[in-house]
Structures are given as structure tokens and as C-alpha cells.
Amino acid sequence: STSEPIWNAAFNVTPGAYMLRVGAVDPAQKIAAGTNASFTVDPTGSDNVLISSLVIGKSCVFVPTPLGPNAKPSGLDYMRAGNCDIQPDPSHYYSPEDVLWTLVRITPIAKLSDKPSKAWKGSFLIVDAKGSKLAEEPVRWLTAPDGSFVATTAFQLADPKLKLKNGE
């Protein structure tokens, strides 16, 4: 086709293994077509921990892991935490009735690669435009098949303790 693409995006990625998901959505918000592509960015040698981008979404869909002798691993899914697939929302707008699901993945390398998931500590924070902390949720690290650790949590935006204001 000789037509120009409708949209494009450029961004930097840190070293790690990635899965790029591309989908086309029709006007009724139904997925019309999609594909996945895996790629790897090698570490520079000076990093001790690789960290993914933060994934946020409005829902987390339970997707059981296939079991049994004929079950085939589907590869590493960077939107998955345990049996839950984070569903990003392309609008990036959230209402007080929404749940904000978060996910990040770390991959310890070099001398930190032998540290078990229970040795790692972390938390997700929500801060306002002035940098004041509104909420903090500690995370429990889940070990992924590739040896990386996945952290996820859910913030109930309707929680009155958050004191969220529009635009802040």
C-alpha cells in the first residue's frame, strides 16, 4: 500500500526481553486484527537490574495457565502477572469508580541474579502534581518463567483516603 500510516510512536527501551503487541480496533471497539512480535535489547554491562516500563490499566483479566502433558508455554507475556493479564486503556483517563492496576518487571543480572524474590522490596506510589504522596501499596514479587520478577497492585480510586482531585 502507498498510503501513509495513520499513527506512529517512537520511544526508548531499556535492556531486556520484550513483546510488542499491535492491534487494530474497529469503531465498535472490537479487535479486528492483531499480532505480536518478540525482541531483545542486550544489557550494556554496567546494569545490575533491568526494569520494564510501568504498565497501567483499568482491569486485570484472569487467564489460567494451561496445564497438562500437552500444555505448551505461550512465551513470556509482559502484560501478565501470575494468572492475570493487565488490560491497558488507551484513553489514559480514569474515573473515581475505576481500579488502577499497575505492573512492573525487574530482571536482576550479574551479582544480583541469585537473589530470590522474597529478598526484594518495593511499593507503588500515587503522588499529586506537587509530589505529595496520596497512596502507597507494597508489592509482592512474583517469579516469572524467565527468572525476572513481576510486581503488581491495584488502587481503588474511589478510596476516600486518596483525596483525588481532577487534574492533580
Image (spheres, rainbow, N blue to C red):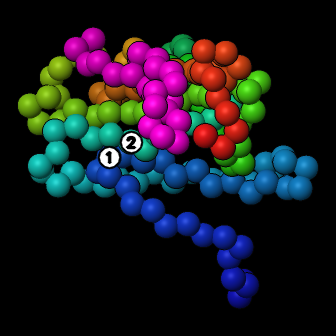
Is 132 magenta? The answer is: yes
| Spatial CA span between label 2 and label 1 | 8 Å
Q: Please provide the residue range marked out in magenta.
A: 118-139
Question: Secondary structure beneath disc 2?
Answer: loop
Amino acid at pointer 2: Ser
Residue 88, horizontal then vertical, whole percent? 64, 40
Above or below residue 118? Residue 108 is below
Q: Nearer the viewer, residue 160 or 122?
A: 160
The total number of labels drawn is: 2
Identify which residue is drawn at 71% across, 73% down: 6
Identify which residue is drawn at 46% across, 31% down: 132
Identify which residue is drawn at 50% across, 30% down: 126
Quadrant where the image shows the N terminus = bottom right
Quadrant where the image shows the C terminus = top right
Instruction: Name which of mark 2 and mark 1 comes first in the sequence.
Output: 1
Above or below residue 65? Residue 2 is below
**Are circles 2 and 1 on residues that touch, CB within 8 Å?**
yes
Residue 2, horizontal then vertical, whole percent? 71, 88
Residue ID for mark 1: 16
Amino acid at pointer 1: Gly
Left or right for 47, reference 143: left
Left or right for 140, reference 29: left
Near mark 1 (Cα within 10 A), the count class, few <14, some 14-19 or many ≥20, is some
Which numbered dot is residue 139? none
Q: Residue furthest left?
A: 111
Residue ID for mark 2: 52
Judged by depth in the image, the label closer to the viewer, 2 or 1, is: 2
